[in-house]
Image (spheres, rainbow, N blue to C red):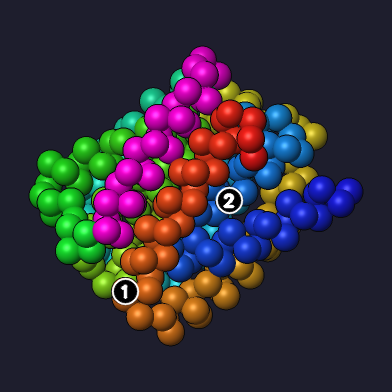
Amino acid sequence: MLAIVLFFIIAFVAAAVASLTGFGSATLLIPFAGLVIDLKQAIILVAFFHFFSNAFKLLRLRQSVNWRLMRLYGVPSIVTAYAGAMLLDRVNVEIISIAFASFIIVYALYSLINPSWSLPDKNGVLVFGGALSGFTAGLIGLGGAIRSMFLISTKIKKEAYIATSAAIAVVVDITRLSVYVFNGSLDARYYWYIAPLIVIAFLGTSLGVKLLIRLPETVVKRSVLILLILVGIRMLLSQYGIF
């Protein structure tokens, strides 16, 4: 029972943090959920939470969505999220996680050391980023970090960054959740988690959006990069059984 209570508390914190950084709700929640239930079941369950937290963010910030980025990044994300979700039961997610973690650590460290550097704001780069993040979202439930790497490099305003990230996440989540539901991937004994997670997603997101409005642009960007590094380190350590 205590583990379940902690799970919901972490979910609230994760929703608030993700409203500031554009990602992190699944990243923070999946490792803990994996200690409570089977990892693949955790990925599916957290996908529901991820969808609702992003839907609430999108409702609050819908006027700030950058539709050019939404089209270039979101469309390939939908296609590859479907492919990743279909492969969930067929591949070793641990190997994918190690490669993914190493990639984001290198990127975030370089961006902190060279704050003026960014990925080119070109259509091809954004399409590639969308395809990569959609695939990792469907496969291991952690596409938000990749999405944030590409979107934060476009130098859009913080509200537009969070709103656009949320809009992309919503369509990706609808795609992968459709696959999970159609395949009956979530065990029925975990259905009851969904209702409280919806309430927690709303409360955590509301707090995070209020804080976002008050923070400077540079603080938001640095927070994203620091969280990327921490997430990458945490993922690597967990795969080697250290943390």
Rendering quarter of residue 100: top left
As drawn, the label of residue 73 is none
Q: Which residue is rendered at x = 38% and y = 70% of the image?
A: 220
Highlighted range, magenta: 89-113
Rendering quarter of residue 198: bottom right
Q: The C terminus appears in which quarter of the rendering?
A: top right
Which amino acid is tagged 1? Thr
Quick check: 80 above or below 66? above
The answer to whether 174 appears left or right of 194 in the picture is left
Which amino acid is tagged 2? Leu
Residue 146 horizontal/vertical position (percent):
35, 45
Q: Which residue is mark 1?
A: 218
Residue at the extreme top of the image, as rendered: 90
The answer to whether 148 appears left or right of 98 in the picture is left
Residue 19 horizontal/vertical position (percent):
48, 66
Question: Can residue 225 be seen at all in this image of the molecule?
Answer: yes
In the image, residue 111 lies in the stretch drawn in magenta: yes
Q: Which residue is mark 2?
A: 28
The answer to whether 16 appears left or right of 188 in the picture is left
Quick check: 108 above or below 78? below
Front-most of residues 72 and 213: 213
Residue 202 horizontal/vertical position (percent):
60, 66
Secondary structure of the residue carrying tag 2 is helix
